[in-house]
Image: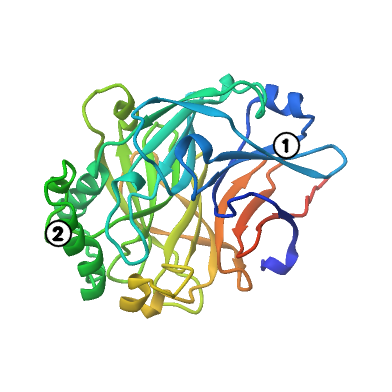
Amino acid sequence: MASKDLESLQLDLQPNEASGLLFVEAAGVLEAHGWQRAFWVVLDESAAQECVAAIGQRPDGEWDVARLAATVVGDLGETRDAEALARRDGWIYVVGSQFGGKSGPLLPRQAFLARFREGDVERLDGGPVQMQVARPGLLLHRLVNDALAQEGVALVTLGDVTREAFIDQSLREGAGESWVGEVHERDTPINVEGATFRAAGTLLLGLRYPVSVEGRPLLVELEGVERLFDGGDPPTVVGTWIVDAVGRDGDMAGVRDLSAVGDDIHLVTGNLDSRPKNSVVLHDYPGGRDTVSTHWRVTLPPDAHGGHIAAELVREFPDMHRIEGIASDDDGRWFYVSDEDDHVRMEHTRLISDA
């Protein structure tokens, strides 16, 4: 099914850099705002405590946008570039990209995780909720790089320009900083754009970069991410999935967002960067510039934590290159959020019923 089969609306979400999408389960939030359904979304140009918003639909079909008021508990340092949302045990997790600017270097302010209790939100415009923030330096960068090497995952060769921008430049500019020890000369930068929890509680991180040597997107599975917020042992990487999910018009694709439904993982894949200007990744990997944004479904074996996995195509978006989020509602309809130059567009399928 193609994007022409979708309904769409335009949303004003300043700053207009929407990423991630997650269905709101808190009945109190829906009742307080008079919404029949709603979705959490993150805005990647804002600090963690300012980056969460809700998009809600009233019974008359009209949509509202409201920003979450939050106050930071924990690390008060600078945060930017929220890219993904995930839910576990009543917590909504916000995941930073762990990346940097389009021309490097790696930025610790983007290497954060945050979470808040969905049940604590009474109204989006009510009193602020507490948001726990963890800024573990480039710990996830280190954990993922070590795991990919130990598992022998064959990655696309790191391009010279990308290496200089993200690894060499980070080592030079980070000299003397506490986080620089997490960066090694032979590392590959990681760019996290999707996240979702599996039923057993492990967290899948969808990488936009790197990709496998065949250009396939990667899902990295973490155990114990909640320990980042209570001073426990670091999380551990328990496996990596290589997903056969490259869309048309490209020879490589990265993850744009993830959503779990039981043992099924739905993912949107697409280009390795949306804006060619100043993008060192697209300079090194032109085959990942025009890959069509595509919705796929995969079924992960419940007792496995890595390997190659086939994907089933669900929908293509040949005329929308910046699909940034995917989520379903209680009726099983799929919604997508698209980050446009002057607005944020949210797409959803028409409701189809056999009744």
Res 263 seen here: no
Reading the image, the residue beneath label 1 is 37
Q: Look at discs 2 and 1 and give the one toward the viewer.
A: 2
Residue in view at x 13 percent, y 61 percent: 186
Would you place residue 295 above or below residue 119 in this image?
A: below
* Residue 166 badge: none
Front residue (pair 219, 10)? 10
Q: How is the image coloured?
A: rainbow
Residue in view at x 64 percent, y 63 percent: 342
Badge 1: residue crowd in 10 Å (few <14, some 14–19, many ≥20): many
Numbered-mark total: 2
Secondary structure, mark 1, is: strand
Front residue (pair 17, 247)? 17
Sooner in the amino-acid sequence: mark 2 or mark 1: 1
Residue in view at x 32 percent, y 64 percent: 211
Question: Image check: 59 left or right of 157?
Answer: right
* Rendered-image quadrant of the N terminus: bottom right
Front residue (pair 147, 168)? 168
Residue in view at x 63 percent, y 29 percent: 25
Q: Position of residue 355 (x, y in %)?
A: 84, 44
Q: Quadrant of residue 64?
A: top right
Reading the image, the residue beneath label 2 is 172
Q: Amino acid at mark 2?
A: Arg
Q: Amino acid at mark 1?
A: Arg
Badge 2: residue crowd in 10 Å (few <14, some 14–19, many ≥20): few
Question: Image check: 38 left or right of 203?
Answer: right
Would you place residue 96 above or below residue 297 in this image?
A: above
Q: Position of residue 67 (x, y in %)?
A: 62, 37
